[in-house]
Image (tube, rainbow, N blue to C red):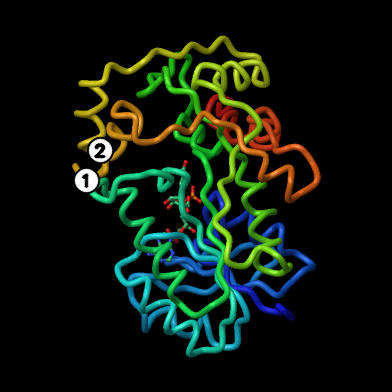
């Protein structure tokens, strides 16, 4: 299938920018986000995926779409894409759907999007990644003592660059249609392990302090809806999501090892330096 033009939805995010980067020289890219912020190597487009009419222009004349899960009407969005001539869609879902429970709010919105993609009539691939290495950016500005929820939980964090590389294969290559791919990093680490890597790269003495569950629950209620707080507690305390098992999908598909947290941190260490170096 000849894929010349790809829409990357969520193109300014941690994963989206890596999908755009990986598509450079492979396809023409439209970078879709609500703000329509510029992205190197792509034509920026503004539109909210919650408003079908507002994103309709993005699909016209495109061959393939990279789509994050969620949004109020995934079947409607996919029908619009198909009507506009799009032939292929790659969905960014989550590893949490594997064996997940439909009354978990996070699992549910991903499962709903996955079902819509499978029923869309488009050629589809679903990506089910682990937690992202880039979640460490939540620690910016980086204090000496980082207080972290679920500090005891090991996660095979994945570098969004690996998601971008696999997405590009699925969007523009052959052989990945009709597949749901569980993607992980190369090792399971705890937050303190990842913080230690940052401390080493920055030459700082950093310490991780586990956040007690009751404190975490109250704090999280202030930043996300209650069903999402519940979802994370069900994942990491209720045993609904085991994100510590390393899968070989990334090396199998890319012919090289999956990138480590240290690989990710070496590229992004500047983001952690910015605030501490400010005069
Ligand atoms: N973090 C994890 O560990 C993890 C693991 C598995 C799956 N995921 C999923 O991966 C997704 C992407 O993660 P990320 O870290 O790349 O997110 P991110 O850095 O927050 O980026 C989100 C991107 O989507 C755009 N966007 C958000 N809402 C939109 C809308 N309604 N219409 C159009 N564009 C929209 C944002 O730009 P504007 O704000 O300008 O719209 C931005 O480009 C998450 O939403 C999550 O569901 C995350």
Give me the residue at 55% from left, 54% from top: 127
Rendered-image quadrant of the C terminus? top right
- 117 sits to left or right of 44: left
Whether the residues at callouts 2 and 1 have beta carbons within 8 Å, the answer is: yes
Give me the residue at 52% from left, 40% from top: 130
Q: Nearer the viewer, residue 217 or 176?
A: 176
Q: Which residue is mark 1?
A: 225
The local secondary structure at tag 2 comes to: helix
Does the residue tagged 2 have its C-beta within 8 Å of any atom of ligand 1? no
Q: Which residue is mark 2?
A: 229
Percent position of residue 145, x then y: 44, 14
Crowd tier of the residue under label 1, counting other residues whose Cα lies within 10 Å: few below 14, some 14–19, many 20 or above: few
- 1 sits to left or right of 97: right
Rendered image quadrant of residue 193 = top right
In the image, is residue 74 above or below residue 200?
below
The local secondary structure at tag 1 comes to: loop
Q: Nearer the viewer, residue 272 or 157?
A: 157
Rendering quadrant holding ligand 1: bottom left
In the image, is residue 51 above or below residue 228?
below
Give me the residue at 54% from left, 87% from top: 60
- 119 sits to left or right of 6: left
Rendered-image quadrant of the N terminus? bottom right
Percent position of residue 55, x then y: 43, 79
Percent position of residue 140, x then y: 48, 31
Give me the residue at 67% from left, 27% from top: 262
Query: Disc 2 to disc 1, how far (Cα)?
Result: 7 Å
Rendered image quadrant of residue 134 = top right
In the image, is residue 252 above or below residue 245?
below
Percent position of residue 178, x then y: 57, 66
Crowd tier of the residue under label 2, counting other residues whose Cα lies within 10 Å: few below 14, some 14–19, many 20 or above: many
Does the residue tagged 1 have its C-beta within 8 Å of any atom of ligand 1? no
């Amino acid at each position: 299938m000849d894929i010349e033009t790809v829409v990357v939805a969520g193109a300014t995010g941690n994963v989206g920018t890596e999908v755009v980067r990986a598509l450079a020289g492979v396809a023409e890219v439209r970078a879709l986000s609500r703000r329509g912020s510029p992205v190197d190597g792509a034509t920026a487009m503004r539109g909210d995926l919650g408003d079908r009419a507002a994103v309709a222009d993005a699909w016209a004349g495109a061959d393939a779409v990279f789509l994050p899960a969620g949004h109020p009407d995934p079947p409607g969005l996919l029908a619009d894409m198909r009507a506009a001539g799009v032939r292929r869609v790659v969905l960014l879902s989550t590893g949490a759907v594997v064996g997940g429970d439909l009354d978990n709010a996070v699992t549910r919105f991903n499962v709903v999007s996955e079902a819509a993609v499978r029923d869309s009539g488009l050629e589809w691939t679903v990506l089910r990644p682990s937690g992202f290495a880039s979640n460490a950016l939540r620690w910016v500005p980086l204090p000496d003592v980082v207080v972290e929820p679920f500090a005891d939980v090991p996660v095979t964090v994945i570098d969004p660059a690996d998601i971008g590389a696999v997405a590009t294969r699925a969007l523009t290559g052959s052989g990945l249609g009709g597949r749901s791919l569980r993607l992980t990093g190369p090792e399971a680490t705890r937050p303190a392990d990842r913080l230690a890597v940052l401390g080493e790269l920055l030459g700082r003495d950093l310490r991780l302090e586990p956040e007690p569950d009751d404190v975490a629950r109250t704090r999280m209620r202030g930043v996300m809806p209650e069903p999402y707080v519940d979802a994370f507690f069900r994942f990491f305390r209720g045993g609904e999501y085991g994100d510590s098992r390393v899968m070989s999908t990334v090396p199998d598909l890319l012919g090289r090892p999956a990138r480590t947290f240290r690989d990710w941190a070496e590229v992004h260490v500047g983001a952690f330096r910015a605030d501490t170096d400010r005069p």
